[in-house]
Every structure is written in structure tokens, then in C-alpha cells.
Amino acid sequence: MKMYRKLLFTAILALLILIRPGQVQAQFIIGDIIKLTVTKVIKAIDLKVQRMQNQTIWLQNAQKALENELSQLRLTEISSWSADQKQLFSTYYDELWKIKATIAYYQRIKNVAVRQVALVNDYKHAWALLQQDKHFSAGELQQMTAVYSGILSASERNLDDVMTVVSSGKTQMSDEQRLELINRAADRLDEKL
């Protein structure tokens, strides 16, 4: 743009120097030439400004497109990261849930075994007391023996149910079904105890 201004100024100055006072008609021709030259220079400058504006608009649009693409990429990265975290922690919590169920499973089995031992110990203690007591007749002792034998047989069946559940290869059932069977056996054992 500065170049065009210098060129215009030089052209006008050169024409003014060439003009002599006696040549008025030549001055009009020179004036027309100057006017035509100035018009062409102004149009060239205007065209250059329009091209620069078009380039600026194109660069702004390119910048917006890049910003949109970058934002989309960031959103994709964030959603991918979120999905990975969800999967990671989902697997982690699923594993914890399985471990909790397994621990409950084994804890319940331990409780059944402890109660079975307590039942047998109670039976031994009660039977020792009954045999020492002279107030019971032989028939009454026989009746009490039958009752205690029935309790021990039932608890033995409960223990067999638990052992069947625990032994691998004997039954095919889910952990939930196994826990349910163990819980029923433990409840029956508690009732007998």
C-alpha cells in the first residue's frame, strides 16, 4: 500500500514539473491522465485491501475449524477416559462383591462347624449330667437318649448338606444357591442347638 502511494505521489509530481504555464490544454490532458492514474491506483489499493480481508476471513474460519476440532478431540479424550475409569472401577467393585460373597460363604461354613461342635459338647455335658442324676428312671433316660439322638442325626444331616455344597464336583449351583443352602442348614442347626 505504501508502494502505491509513493508511485502515485511520484507520478503527480512528475506531471506537475512537466506542465508549463503556456500549455493549458496539455494541462487538461495531463490532468485527465493523472485522474486516470489515481483512479487505477485507488482501485488497485482497494483490490489489495479486499484480498487481505478475504485472507483474514479465511484464516479466522480456519482458526474456528481448528478450535472446534480440538474441542471435539478433547471431549472424545475425556469421554474415553471416563469410560475407561468406569470399566476399571466396575471390574474392581464386581471383584470386591464376589470376594464379599465368598468370605460370607466361608464365614457361614465356619459358624456351622462351630455350632455343630457346640451342639455335640452340649450333648456330652447334658448326657453326663443326666447319667449322674438318680431321679430319672431307665425309661426316661431312654426317652432323652432318643431325643438327643434325633437332634444329633438332624444336625449331622445339616453338616452333610454343608459338606456337599463345599465339595467341588458334587453339585453344580451358583454361589447364591450355595449360600442359600448353607444358610438353611445353619438355621436348622441353630434351631436344634
Image (tube, grey):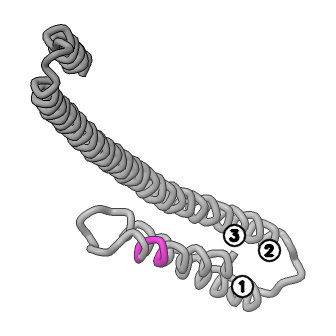
Write down the quadrant of residue 60 in the picture. top left
- Give the Cα distance between marks 1 and 2: 9 Å
Marks 1 & 2, CB-CB < 8 Å contact: yes
Q: Quadrant of the C terminus?
A: bottom right
Few, some or many C-alpha atoms within 10 Å of disc 1 (few <14, some 14-19, many ≥20)? some
In the image, what residue occupies the spot 17% across and 12% down? 20
The residue at which mark 2 appears reads as 130
At label 1, the amino acid type is Met
The residue at which mark 3 appears reads as 123
Q: Earlier in the sequence, mark 1 or mark 2?
A: 2
Instruction: Please say if 91 is above or below 74.
Output: below
Instruction: Please say if 101 is above or below 179.
Output: above
The residue at which mark 1 appears reads as 144
In this picture, residue 107 sits left or right of residue 67: right
Main SS, magenta residues? helix
At label 2, the amino acid type is Leu
Magenta residue span: 177-181
In this picture, residue 190 sits left or right of residue 27: right
- Give the Cα distance between marks 3 and 2: 10 Å
- Of marks 3 and 2, the one in the foreground: 3
